[in-house]
């Protein structure tokens, strides 16, 4: 029974790790391959070669220039990518008034 619990926990942990966005301009080929669906280490190495040749990746659409990465692969991974211009959404902080008083005064 403990083995089953351990396996379930390991699968859940790997799923959570894969859900984290990957910075295409900083990550290794292994990190890119593990974070993106349909992208293996060889394709991830091509992404790294692209960024080394052309500079930082600014938008996910640049990956379409890499042979073997098409619109479907791009769309299913869009929310898993961090690029120069695309960052994951963070929690919205409540706006504070400039005078430091109560918001509705």
Image (cartoon, rainbow, N blue to C red):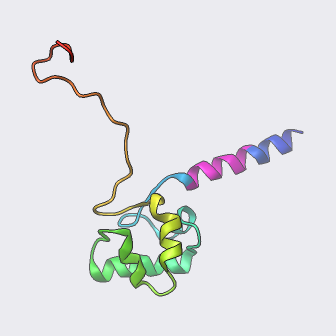
At a point 33% along the width and 59% down the height, the residue shown is 86
Rendered location of residue 23, percent (x, y): 40, 61
Above or below, 83 relative to 1: below
At a point 43% along the width and 84% down the height, the residue shown is 66
Rendered location of residue 12, percent (x, y): 68, 47
Front in this rendered view, residue 90 or 9? 90
Magenta stretch: includes residue 13: yes
Rendered location of residue 6, percent (x, y): 78, 43
**Image-based side of 70 in relation to 57, left or right:** right
**Image-based side of 23 in relation to 8, left or right:** left
Residue range of the region highlighted in magenta in the rendering = 9-18
Magenta stretch: includes residue 90: no
**Overall secondary structure of the magenta stretch?**
helix
User: Which corner quadrant holds the C terminus?
Assistant: top left
- Which of the 4 image quarters holds residue 90? top left
- Which of the 4 image quarters holds residue 35? bottom right
**Image-based side of 73 in relation to 13, left or right:** left
Q: How many marks?
A: 0
At a point 57% along the width and 56% down the height, the residue shown is 18
């Amino acid at each position: 029974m403990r083995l089953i619990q351990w396996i379930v926990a390991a699968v859940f942990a790997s799923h959570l790790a894969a859900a984290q966005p990957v910075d295409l301009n900083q990550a290794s080929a292994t990190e890119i391959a593990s974070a993106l669906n349909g992208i293996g280490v060889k394709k991830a190495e091509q992404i790294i070669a692209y960024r080394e040749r052309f500079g930082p990746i600014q938008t996910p659409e640049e990956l379409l220039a890499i042979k073997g990465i098409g619109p479907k692969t791009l769309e299913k991974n869009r929310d898993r990518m961090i690029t120069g211009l695309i960052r994951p959404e963070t929690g919205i902080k409540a706006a504070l008034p400039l005078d430091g008083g109560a918001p509705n005064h």
